[in-house]
């Protein structure tokens, strides 16, 4: 009886561990052998249970890792602007994956991305974001073949993370690709020596790299479209639409903070004559030169916009009339000094009439946003008209 049941159990286990149970021993009726066999089966059973437990733990761990990575990827996919995405990669990723260091390299041929982003956001100040002109610096890091690399090599780690190399003990170098084209590289550094060892399964990191690549490309394309709709393509100053959006925002901010806000309207003098005598393309060149020379006179928070034709506006947040008049005078002088070349290589100059308006929290002043906006525009418009009427090439403001 006992032999029969032992045989049944053994048959079950034979498929799993055939080498450990010999048929000759089973055929023996000796009871001590039976006990040994039972003990051996129990031991096998324990081993199998342990193995199963480890497999389940490992599957659970993998599932948790997968869920964490999915959540992270979703977090990147939900970024609504390039600025937010970069912040999430460089700051939040470090925190969420408990990394010591994160470094992002992006290939930016001709500096197009940097120009676009600086025109939209000003300078994005991260000391771990690097724009490179071509793939060459990455080849040096990756040792020519640019593929996902997990390493504990101190020599490689020292070539990363600028001056802070000693913090990281192991690194993951994740190339960022769109199609066949490399667009950058993401470097993750851990203070744990065993975190990124070469034998680690790298599919999660690989997938994360693909998602980040798509997010970067998409957010840059969106920024390009947004930029096109808000910038004057001739002068690269902001356009009228952007100006009105910014004006509404700044008026709301000024009302809240009870700070002044000023506006300048610039109208180039006798511009028709320039077009008529030197040609429309030379007129275009003059407009470009004017915008180029005014921009550096302004603060980062000020906004230069082309209002239309040969008219520009400057929005000066947190600026009272007295200060606005000084800035206007500086602009007027600068414009008069610009040397513009006509098609025959001759230098000519232009002048501009400027009207200034200003709003500050005061009982005499309009207080709701729409009337503040009308007030600023009408006063600046009247002032520029006055400047034209009284001789051009001057700055005027209307009191009251
Ligand atoms: N080249 C060029 N000219 C433009 C553009 N937009 C408007 N203009 C010209 O700007 C000129 C504006 O002329 P007016 O409004 O008569 O004013 P003005 O000649 O500057 O005279 P005042 O403003 O009175 O000093 C017109 O000839 C327009 O054709 C543009 O994008 N490029």
Image (cartoon, rainbow, N blue to C red):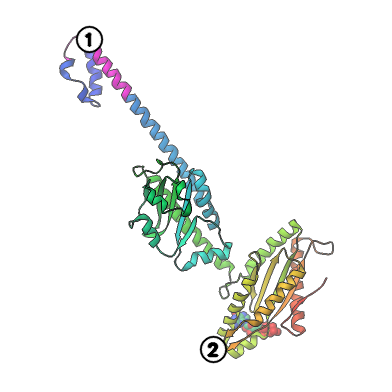
Mark 1: give few (<14), some (14-19) or many (20+) Cα within 10 Å. few
**Residue occupying the far left of the picture:** 24
- Could you tell me residue 163's position as x and y percent? 48, 53
Report if residue 46 lies within the magenta region.
yes
CB under 8 Å between discs 2 and 1: no
- Could you tell me residue 374's position as x and y percent? 75, 68
Magenta stretch: helix, strand or loop mostly: helix
- Could you tell me residue 114's position as x and y percent? 51, 64
How many labels sit on residues?
2
The quarter of the image that holds ligand 1 is bottom right
Q: Which residues are magenta?
A: 26-47
**Callout 2: SS:** loop
- Which residue is painted at 22% across and 24% down in the image? 14
Q: CA distance from mark 2 to mark 1?
A: 113 Å
**Callout 1: SS:** helix
Residue underneath mark 2: 345
Q: Is residue 81 visible?
A: no
- Could you tell me residue 353's position as x and y percent? 71, 80
35 left or right of 245 in image: left
- Which residue is painted at 48% across and 67% down in the image? 111
Residue underneath mark 1: 32
Residue 13 occupies quadrant: top left
Mark 2: give few (<14), some (14-19) or many (20+) Cα within 10 Å. few
């Amino acid at each position: 009886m006992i032999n029969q049941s032992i045989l049944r159990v053994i048959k079950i286990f034979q498929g799993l561990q055939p080498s450990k149970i010999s048929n000759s021993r089973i055929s023996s009726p000796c009871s001590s052998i039976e006990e040994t066999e039972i003990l051996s089966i129990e031991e096998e059973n324990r081993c199998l249970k342990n193995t199963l437990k480890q497999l389940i733990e490992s599957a659970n761990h993998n599932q948790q890792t997968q869920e964490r990575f999915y959540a992270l990827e979703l977090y990147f996919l939900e970024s609504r602007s390039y600025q937010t995405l970069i912040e999430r990669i460089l700051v939040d990723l470090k925190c969420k994956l408990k990394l010591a260091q994160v470094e992002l390299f992006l290939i930016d041929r001709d500096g197009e991305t940097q120009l676009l982003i600086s025109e939209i956001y000003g300078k994005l100040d991260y000391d771990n974001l690097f724009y490179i002109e071509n793939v060459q610096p990455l080849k040096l890091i990756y040792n020519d073949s640019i593929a996902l690399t997990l390493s504990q090599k101190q020599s490689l780690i020292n070539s990363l993370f600028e001056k802070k190399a000693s913090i990281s003990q192991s690194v993951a170098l994740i190339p960022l690709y769109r199609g066949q084209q490399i667009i950058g590289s993401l470097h993750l550094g851990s203070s744990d020596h065993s975190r990124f060892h070469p034998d680690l399964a790298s599919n999660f990191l690989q997938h994360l790299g693909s998602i980040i690549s798509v997010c970067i490309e998409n957010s840059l394309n969106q920024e390009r479209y947004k930029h096109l709709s808000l910038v004057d393509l001739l002068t690269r100053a902001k356009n009228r639409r952007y100006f009105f959006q910014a004006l509404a925002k700044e008026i709301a901010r000024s009302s809240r903070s009870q700070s002044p806000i000023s506006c300048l309207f610039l109208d180039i003098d006798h511009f028709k004559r320039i077009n008529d005598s030197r040609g429309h393309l030379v007129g275009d060149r003059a407009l470009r030169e004017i915008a180029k020379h005014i921009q550096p006179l302004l603060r980062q928070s000020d906004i230069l916009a082309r209002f239309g034709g040969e008219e520009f506006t400057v929005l000066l947040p947190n600026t009272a009339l007295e200060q606005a008049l000084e800035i206007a005078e500086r602009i007027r002088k600068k414009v008069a000094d610009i040397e513009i070349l006509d098609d025959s290589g001759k230098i000519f100059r232009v002048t501009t009439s400027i009207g200034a308006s200003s709003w500050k929290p005061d009982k005499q002043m309009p207080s709701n946003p729409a009337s503040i906006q009308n007030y600023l525009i009408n006063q600046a418009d009247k002032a520029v008209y006055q400047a034209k009427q009284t001789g051009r090439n001057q700055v005027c403001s209307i009191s009251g």
